[in-house]
Amino acid sequence: MIFDRPDEQQGSVRVRVSGSCSSLAVIPAYNEAATIAEVIGSLHEHAPDFDVLVVDDGSTDDTAERARRSGARVLSLPFNLGIGGAVQAGFLHALEHGYAFLAQVDGDGQHGAEQLSRLVQAMDEGGVDMVCGSRFLTSDFHYPAPVSRRTGIHIFAFLLSRIVGTRVSDPTSGFRLYNRRAIELFAHDYPHDYPEVEAVLMLHHHRLRMREVPVQMYARGGGSSSISTGKSGYYMIKVLLALMVGLARRRPVVDPGDLAPVTAEQGV
Amino acid sequence: MPGRIQLVAIIGSAVLLLTVLEMVRRRRLMERYALVWLLSAVVLLALASWSGALLKISRAIGVIYPPNALFFVAFAFVLLLLLHFSAAVSRLSDQTKVLAQRLALLDERVRSHEAAAAENDEDMQEAYGDDAQRGSVITRVPPRR
């Protein structure tokens, strides 16, 4: 994307001005060579405002090479950090290059680029720092996943909704749009292993607001999920532990002048 | 405490202490990790040789056979050491994560600058022909290929 713009001023170093309305789509990818080109192409087609950054999380296949050929910028991690470390690298990139918005999109084709506009629209309506695409908000949703995983998701949803005080229907969704405040927060500190659920809790503790919008998700286009059925139990316990630890942690103090939304005051 | 087991305990903890000291001397063990080891070796050696103190401890914690109190203290130190190392590993893996991310970010920066420079170079050649290479028009140094 960067290199094929003839109208760009030649030789200029591309440093963005903070506060400009630029958007970055971050695709964390671990061995997603089968689908990555398609995902990038779809983003270029349906969301041309977004620069595309693939974070290659130490893949053993040619994910990075294919992503580069498809015109995406690529961050190549030297070894596998896990989804949390990979996404945080994306936040760091967005922070340093002054992007105003960051969209997180899965590399396996689960999230349709054409649905990104729904997230953008919700962000444009204002008042929120993160918009999350939820697959459970439409009445006719069809989510092809084993019962064990769906049960897990609903348990997290129930717990998080109690803690946060607003309804969170799909806390494990990785289809998200963040504004500059959220980017700054998560570039500084992002949960490790299975970060999505904990990230919702972090947002709440830092008095940032989130909102869900209904999206449709598709079956994986290829590759395999980072969470196999056998690991579901481990995943549940780890995330529950992370939630408890997150609750026990010292709450951040809101700086004077910061927004302190109502939802945050209804905590536990 | 019976003579033989006391002797074994003294020799064992003395060997531990000397090994740790030697490893620190040879820089095989960093001081910050050696501190807990040194502390445990010194305490074990003291308890093994000074059986009066060991007797008091065993009475205080309700152990009938004093050498068992020595094992108890040694076990407590092992747990302390393991916890210490788990904390160290956690910190190291966090630092490794930051390094990996920083490396990837810098790598991307270098690549984009090189690509921009290469593109720039080609355009210069198109526009100025060989002058670009001689540097008479352009002060910019072309990147090495």
Image: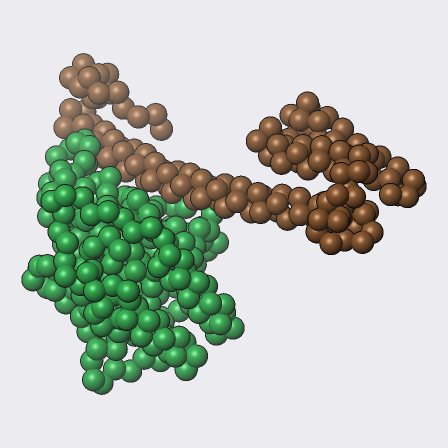
Chain colours: A green, B brown
* Residue A186, placed above or below residue A116: above
- Residue furthest top in the image: B136
Front one among A15 and B98: B98
Q: Position of residue B107 (x, y in %)?
A: 36, 38
Front one among B104 and B53: B53
Q: Residue at position x 26%, y 20% from top?
A: B141
> In the image, is B14 to the left or to the right of A18?
right
Q: Residue at position x 70%, y 51% from top?
A: B61
| Residue B94 appears in view | yes
Q: Position of residue A217 (x, y in %)?
A: 27, 73
Q: Residue at position x 75%, y 48% from top?
A: B58
- Residue furthest bottom in the image: A140
Q: Position of residue A1 (x, y in %)?
A: 22, 48
Count of residue discs:
0
| Residue A170 appears in view | no
> In the image, is A19 to the left or to the right of A97?
left
Locate the C terminus of chain A by quadrant: bottom left
